Image (tube, rainbow, N blue to C red):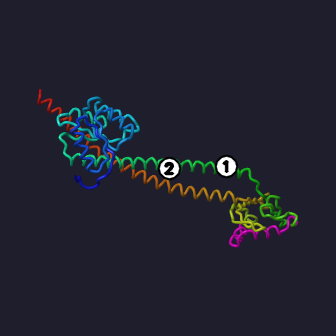
């Protein structure tokens, strides 16, 4: 029995107390390729659901032990079963019960006597919708989880930055002083350490300090640092710069060097400067920048995906609007029947 395109498989629980109807529906669904579980009353149905949750339930409204509407109500209050689509079986004259069944969580109903094509079509549609909803909800939860993880990573990066700032404050920084009048240079021990030079190898104050330090900078940077130094010594313009740096022993590092003119009576008498090994800081800042860029890309992409999934969910929810219109039509019909009988 062909019901058209997009057939899908599914585990369907049939709850029907009339054995002839139960067998008839069973044959229809079994022939269509579904896995079918029959139950002749409400208690059997609940035990079957507890054993294994079906993909869809086709259930008679009126049952001998537990009302089908009551079973549906119980299912909708249980997080494990609340998303199972329930299609009710009803007699054509049970308008009030149909309305109640839909209000209690039923997604649709089929009317006796059964039309096999109609039954299969309704089942196929609701199985497809339930499958889509599960996928969308799962994807949305995964996206939300990933975005939360990215936010946690960002917080850790911010904490790393704060720790880095504290470490910089406590770090040892080499100092140097240039005497303009005597043209002499003096370094602190830490400045020698950063250059990996031995203070004993140099006569204090000699210009050789500048010459040896200049060769630690890359060729393209030497003119820049020397020019900044001369401008500071002659015009009092401070500088604060970062450079790649090769120590006397050949180790590659990054340094930050600063300088400020020492002025007395409007005359520059010297230049006070610092040099700091910022290799680790530079690595961390580079990694932070990469992480942030990567994080921004991920969050942006995930946000776009989440927005698209939300739109799909909204579209999916719109598919159920017709159910509300059907309820209204049934209510209007009831009112018409009541007016006609009065």
Describe the element under mark 1 as helix, strand or loop: helix
Nearer-the-camera pick, 40 or 177: 40
Q: Is residue 232 visible?
A: yes
Which residue is painted at 17% across and 32% down in the image? 335
Compare residues 109 and 19 and report the one nearer the observer: 19
Quarter of the image for residue 89 reads: top left
* Residue of label 1: 163
Extent of the magenta region:
203-228
Q: How many marks?
A: 2
Residue at which label 2 appears: 147
Q: How far across and how far down the image is residue 209, in percent?
A: 81, 67
Q: Position of residue 278 (x, y in %)?
A: 70, 59
340 drawn magenta = no
Q: Residue at x 79, y 68 (%)?
A: 210
Q: Residues within 10 Å of mark 1 (few under 14, many from 20)?
A: few
Above or below, 110 against 202 in this view is above
Question: Which residue is depicted at the point 26% across and 41% down?
Answer: 108
Let me know if residue 210 is in the magenta part.
yes
């Amino acid at each position: 029995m062909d019901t058209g395109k997009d057939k899908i498989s599914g585990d369907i629980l049939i709850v029907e107390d009339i054995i002839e109807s139960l067998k008839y529906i069973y044959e229809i669904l079994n022939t269509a390729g579904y896995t079918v579980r029959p139950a002749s009353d409400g208690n059997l149905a609940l035990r079957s659901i507890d054993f294994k949750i079906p993909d869809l339930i086709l259930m008679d409204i009126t049952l001998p032990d537990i009302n089908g509407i009551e079973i549906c109500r119980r299912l909708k209050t249980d997080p494990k079963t609340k998303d199972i689509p329930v299609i009710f079986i009803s007699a054509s004259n049970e308008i009030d019960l149909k309305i109640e069944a839909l209000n209690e969580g039923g997604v649709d109903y089929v009317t006796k006597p059964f039309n096999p094509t109609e039954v299969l079509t309704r089942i196929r549609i609701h199985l497809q919708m339930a499958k889509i909803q599960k996928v969308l909800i799962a994807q949305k939860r995964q996206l939300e989880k990933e975005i939360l993880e990215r936010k946690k990573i960002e917080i850790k990066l911010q904490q790393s930055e704060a720790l880095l700032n504290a470490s910089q404050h406590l770090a040892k920084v080499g100092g140097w002083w240039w005497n303009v009048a005597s043209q002499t240079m003096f370094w602190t021990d830490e400045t020698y350490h950063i250059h990996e030079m031995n203070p004993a190898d140099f006569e204090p104050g000699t210009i050789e300090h500048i010459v040896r330090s200049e060769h630690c900078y890359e060729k393209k940077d030497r003119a820049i640092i020397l020019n900044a130094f001369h401008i500071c010594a002659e015009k009092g313009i401070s500088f604060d710069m970062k450079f790649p740096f090769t120590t006397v022993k050949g180790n590659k590092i990054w340094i930050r060097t600063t300088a400020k003119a020492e002025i007395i009576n409007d005359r520059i008498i010297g230049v006070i400067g610092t040099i700091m090994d910022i290799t680790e800081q530079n690595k961390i800042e580079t990694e932070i920048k990469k992480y942030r860029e990567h994080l921004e890309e991920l969050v942006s992409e995930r946000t776009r995906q989440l927005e698209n999934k939300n739109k799909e969910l909204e579209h999916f929810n719109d598919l159920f609007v017709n159910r509300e219109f059907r309820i209204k039509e049934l209510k209007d019909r009831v009112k018409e029947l009541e007016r006609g009988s009065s």
